[in-house]
């Protein structure tokens, strides 16, 4: 009996003309999309340039029609406007605000800060003036000084303020006295109005000279127990002022040992 032949089948994939046609069509579509995107980009770029030119033309019409100065107490609005590096009629967007702020702060030490901002056809100048926390004497002239350790000329009502004068031999001493006044002010409140002068003694202790002429040796400028020490001092001072016509001095340097020395003024 004759053997039957066995046949094997093999699948062969061939590239049909239809597949090649799809690939070609996809390339054409991609090319078309790229051209379309390029045209859109060119259109937007041209449109954007035109808009910028239009906006620029409108910006040229944005001029300063008003300058508003607020926050003046002792400095006049007229002198601030005189110092501004721009004026009515200038282009609102071309003025350099930061440069103007720095220039005026350098010229006016009475200013703690100045903020200049643009508004619609207007510039607003906001001033923050310094307030004296003490007086100092520099080259024979009385100046104000605040806790930034920045001296400035006295303006308006400032010379009549009840703040102590500080006497010092160095910039470091001045800074220490200001730091002490800042801390002392938080515990003594309005009592600071009774102190005419503060300084360091030869031994490095802080000394008050009261408006009454009495001398107070406070001691070291330590922050610890400042509140309790002031309460003790205030009681001693009030009692002594009620008991004696005039005081020569009060010594608080022995506070840590629980003592205060009071000496009345004798004729």
Image (cartoon, helix red, strand yellow):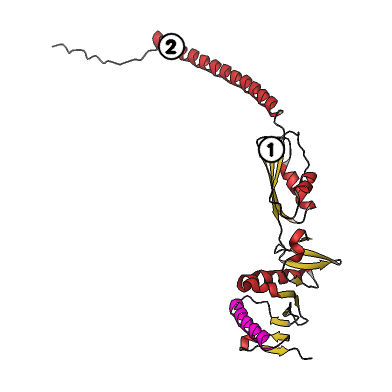
Picture coordinates of residue 177, whole percent (x, y) = 72, 72
The residue drawn where x is 75% and y is 70% is 174
| Residue sitting farthest toward the bottom | 266
**Magenta span includes 230:** yes
Name the quadrant containing residue 151: bottom right
In the image, which residues are magenta? 219-245
Q: CA distance from mark 1 to mark 2?
A: 69 Å
- The kind of secondary structure the magenta stretch mainly shows is helix
Please indicate, yes or no, whether residue 11 appears anywhere in the rendered image: yes
**260 in relation to 138, above or below:** below
Q: How many marks?
A: 2
Side (left or right) of 36 relative to 263: left
- Which element is circle 1 on? strand
Q: Residues within 10 Å of mark 2 (few under 14, many from 20)?
A: few
Assign the C terminus to one quadrant of the image: bottom right
Q: Earlier in the sequence, mark 1 or mark 2?
A: 2
Residue on which disc 2 sits:
20
The residue drawn where x is 76% and y is 47% is 80
């Amino acid at each position: 009996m004759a053997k039957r032949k066995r046949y094997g089948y093999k699948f062969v994939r061939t590239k049909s003309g239809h597949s090649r046609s799809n690939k070609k069509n996809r390339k054409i579509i991609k090319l078309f999309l790229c051209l379309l995107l390029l045209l859109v980009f060119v259109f937007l770029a041209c449109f954007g340039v035109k808009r910028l030119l239009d906006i620029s033309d409108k910006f040229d019409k944005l001029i300063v029609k008003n300058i508003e100065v607020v926050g003046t107490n002792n400095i006049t609005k007229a002198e601030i406007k005189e110092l501004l590096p721009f004026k009515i009629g200038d282009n609102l967007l071309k003025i350099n605000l930061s440069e103007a702020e720095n220039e005026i702060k350098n010229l006016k030490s009475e200013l703690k800060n100045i903020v200049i901002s643009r508004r619609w056809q207007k510039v607003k100048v906001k001033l923050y003036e310094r307030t004296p926390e003490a007086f100092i004497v520099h080259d024979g002239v009385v100046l104000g000084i605040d806790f930034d350790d920045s001296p400035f000329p006295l303006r308006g009502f400032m010379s009549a303020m009840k703040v102590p004068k500080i006497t010092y031999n160095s910039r470091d001493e001045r800074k220490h006295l200001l730091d002490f006044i800042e801390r002392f002010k938080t515990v003594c409140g309005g009592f600071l109005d009774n102190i005419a002068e503060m300084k360091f003694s030869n031994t490095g202790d802080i000394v008050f000279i009261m408006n009454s002429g009495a001398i107070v040796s406070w001691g070291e400028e330590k922050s610890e127990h400042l509140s309790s020490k002031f309460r003790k001092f205030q009681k001693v001072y009030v009692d002594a002022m009620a008991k004696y016509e005039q005081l020569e001095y009060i010594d608080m340097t022995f506070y840590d040992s629980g003592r205060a020395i009071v000496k009345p003024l004798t004729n």
